[in-house]
Image: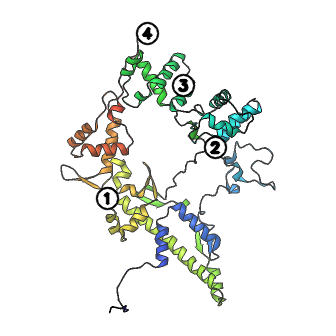
Amino acid sequence: MSGLHPRLIQKQSQTMAPCLQEGVRLLQLSSLDFIQEMRAMLDTNPFLEGDEGDAPLAPDPAAAGERESWQWDGVKTTGNAGGSDNGEFDAINLVPSQASLAEHLHAQLNVLTLEARDLSLAHAIVDSLDDDGLLRTPLDEIAPCAGLQPLAGWTEMRIALRRVQSLEPTGVGARSLQECLRLQAREVACPDRRELVCRIVDDHLDQLVGSRDPTPLARLLGVPPAEVQAACDLIRRMDPRPGSRHGSEPTRYIVPDLVVSKVRGRWTPALNPALRPAIRFNQVYAEMFERHRGRGDGPLAGQLRDARWAVNSLQQRFVTILEVARSIVDRQPGFFEFGEMALKPMALRDVAREVGIHESTVSRVTNNKYVATRHGVFELKHFFSRAMTSASGAEFSGKAVRELVAEMIRGESAEAPLSDAEIARQLERQGLVVCRRTVTKYRHELKLPSAEQRQRVSVPLPEAA
């Protein structure tokens, strides 16, 4: 008869201490997220203090007293604008707020001289628009939402829709792509060209997606190709989502963690002082606590331990980032001098061996960390790419070939653009063996259209009478 018998098994396994796990988590944070973590710890831990002699934790837009006077030139305030209830200046009140599309349209309707019933119907239509500013809901379903008695009829709803479509931005309130573009076509100054644009939008919009050659469409419309080309260019510049510009999230600019500059003829990375948290350990409070430490001081003892760990983690984080950045810069001097086409193949293990850390640590360091160069701002992981072998046996970076493809397309003839197969042949003549599918992949990454879509036929202008 079988039974359960206890058995003792010994085995070895690797586990990470809680402090090490927290250190790894903080290492992979972006600098702005790391600053928020340190700021929160600074606010709650009495053994940490900000170092007033160093850079601040982050740029503080509310520190109006420390700003130069020229930064406030031209700001006009009336009454208590920009001020708090007690009359003191508050810079946060000067920060502009982004109005939503509905607020933008309601404000325009409120200045029109309309009857209360007409205004309510127009407001109901505005509330039914989607984020793109288009009307996806049928008018007969919007009428009951206005809460009017008697219920608005088809004619009233059509009039209310026309009022909404007359608002800014042009094209708002459209029920289809054709209607949106037609509303924007009304702003074309030339009557003949406006008529041609409307004809293309109504009957031949699908032909704009294909070839850019205007000759077939010109033959179909019985109009000179130059006029058709000009009308198609106007349509392509129109906005099919007129409401997307309002109420969208503000642009979040990247603040580089490092800056690479040439020092004594050598490219050298340096930490961005604006992103270095100014935190230091309060030794005075720590000594007072140690002298008067009692049994009930468990929470304070934990905060003292966390404060020491935070300072060490802060120092170790920036040392690791700087060491990894130095290794990358030393291995990629051609990129910082000449740009993307001089990028060399490099793997995580190459930097890990030189710095003396694990590959996973290099991956965490290079993720969400940015460096400012003379060629732009790049993420640190941008400098890592797979090695490819040329016909002569030399290694080159795939990202360098991608930039070379972009350079070839920028220098091509508008009448005879290069196909992906022709680009692959030209690269092979230079010793870079790349198949056509790889060229197509690089072109997609660069968001460049195909050769057929890039083709622009040179059409002679009609002679003057």
Against 165, residue 344 (above or below) is below
Q: Which residue is mark 4?
A: 464
The mark nearer the N terminus, 4 or 3, is: 3
| Tag 4–tag 3 contact (CB < 8 Å) | no
The residues bearing labels 4 and 2 have C-alpha atoms spaced at a distance of: 50 Å
The amino acid at mark 2 is Ser
- Residue at 37% across, 39% down: 448
The amino acid at mark 4 is Ala
The amino acid at mark 3 is Ala
Point out the frontmost of discs 1 and 3. Answer: 3
Find residue 100 and name its label.
Answer: 2
The residues bearing labels 4 and 1 have C-alpha atoms spaced at a distance of: 60 Å
The mark nearer the N terminus, 4 or 1, is: 1
Q: Nearer the viewer, residue 50 or 17?
A: 17
The residues bearing labels 1 and 3 have C-alpha atoms spaced at a distance of: 52 Å
The mark nearer the N terminus, 1 or 3, is: 3
Q: Which residue is mark 1?
A: 346
Q: Secondary structure at mark 2?
A: loop
